[in-house]
Amino acid sequence: MKAIGFTTSHPISHEESFMEFHKDVPEPEGRDLLVKIEAISVNPVDYKIRQNSTLETVLEDPKIIGWDAIGTVVSMGESTELFKKGDRVFYAGDLTRPGSNQEYQLIDERIVGFAPKKITAPQAASMPLTSLTAWELLFDRIRLSQDRDKGKTLLIIGGAGGVGSIAIQLAKKVAGLTVLATASRPETKAWCEKMGADHVVDHRDLVHQVHEAGFKEVDFIADFVDTNGYWDSMVELIKPQGHIASITGNETPILLNKLKTKSVSFSWEFMYTRSMYQTDDMIEQHHILNRVAGLLDSGTIISTLNHVLNGFTVANLNEANELLESNKTIGKIAIEF
């Protein structure tokens, strides 16, 4: 089968930032599915790993990245219980295993969902990683409840990105929140409004912009951009007994003591935790993806796909990553095989 990977970390402009190669189709064992891939999408984690994972080494076997895919189950390991041959599935994968930039992939069935039936392959491939991240942040980390929290306010920092785009929709359509999302360009503001944001505010003057929108403070904050850079603004804007959650990491220590007098909670969200540590509730990602597929098929939420490249080629992976690294992308970029 064909695969695309890299043996050392190069800038995306380098002619060997990605390379095509061939390898044997693997055999599934245990709870693994073997999936024939139809389409993939790209995420910032792709280029971050490509840029940093092999900086001072040259691998003998190319590293395969990619953490979003849709495809068809062609065979199963002996311990599988959730799927059968011919099932169409979608998933975000496991950071510790070879990714989706290959024609066939082994994937643990517990982090796989049945693919939505009423949208295209690229539309579906754009959804797993961002949907899992947003869902876990909202419902597992902040622990939103529609019965308890309907009508409360959520500020999303980074509304037009992949995760922000689906977080707006889940917060509105599933949790029933009032959503403020940050964006600064006319096209990103329009995108956030399309996703369902009640208010779009400029991140360059965040506190003032939130106040101008009519809110002194907000109940919840989801940071998808820069924990350190927005920390003081988040501390000022969060309500007493509120909750802040972030996916972005931090270059310098976060001053959690600034949250003490407000009794504010803080959580990290890392979508790969369940698969990386084989947690007891790892199968929750199967259930979340099935729920997301149902929401997509019912039209409750829409795919965040905004750009499609046709053909599983080095050139298309390069183009997709160049677009991502520009930090100006809106929604998701998919590649159809």
Image (cartoon, rainbow, N blue to C red):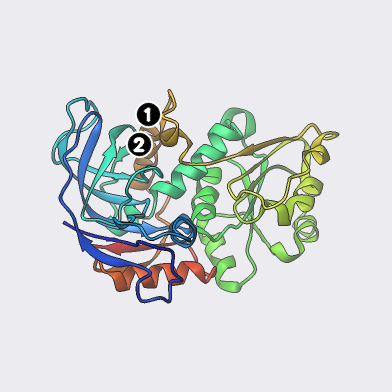
Q: Are marks 1 and 2 in contact (CB under 8 Å)?
A: no
- Picture coordinates of residue 292 (x, y %)? 39, 41
Disc 1 crowd, CA 10 A, few/some/many (<14, 14-19, 20+)? some
Disc 1 to disc 2, how far (Cα)?
A: 6 Å
Q: In the visual, does 219 lie left or right of 162?
A: right
Identity, as a three-letter code, of the amino acid under mark 2: Ile
Under tag 2, what secondary structure?
A: helix
Residue 121 seen anywhere in this rendered image of the structure: yes
Height in image: 155 above or below 283? below
Going from N to C along the chain, the mark reached first, 1 or 2, is 2
Disc 2 crowd, CA 10 A, few/some/many (<14, 14-19, 20+)? many
- Picture coordinates of residue 309 (x, y %)? 31, 69
Quadrant of the image occupied by residue 283: top left
- Picture coordinates of residue 320 (x, y %)? 39, 68
The N terminus is located in which quarter?
bottom left
The foreground one among 336 and 195 is 336
- List the residue tagged with mark 1: 283
- Picture coordinates of residue 252 (x, y %)? 72, 50
- List the residue tagged with mark 2: 111
The C terminus is located in which quarter?
bottom left
Q: How many marks?
A: 2
Residue situated furthest top in the rendering: 280
**Residue shown at 59% from the left, 55% from the top:** 197
**Residue shown at 79% from the left, 56% from the top:** 207
**Residue shown at 22% from the left, 63% from the top:** 21
**Residue shown at 39% from the left, 47% from the top:** 128
Q: In the visual, does 99 lie left or right of 321?
A: left
Quadrant of the image occupied by residue 54: bottom left
Under tag 1, what secondary structure?
A: loop
Quadrant of the image occupied by residue 141: top right
Identity, as a three-letter code, of the amino acid under mark 1: Ile
Q: In the visual, does 201 lie left or right of 173?
A: right
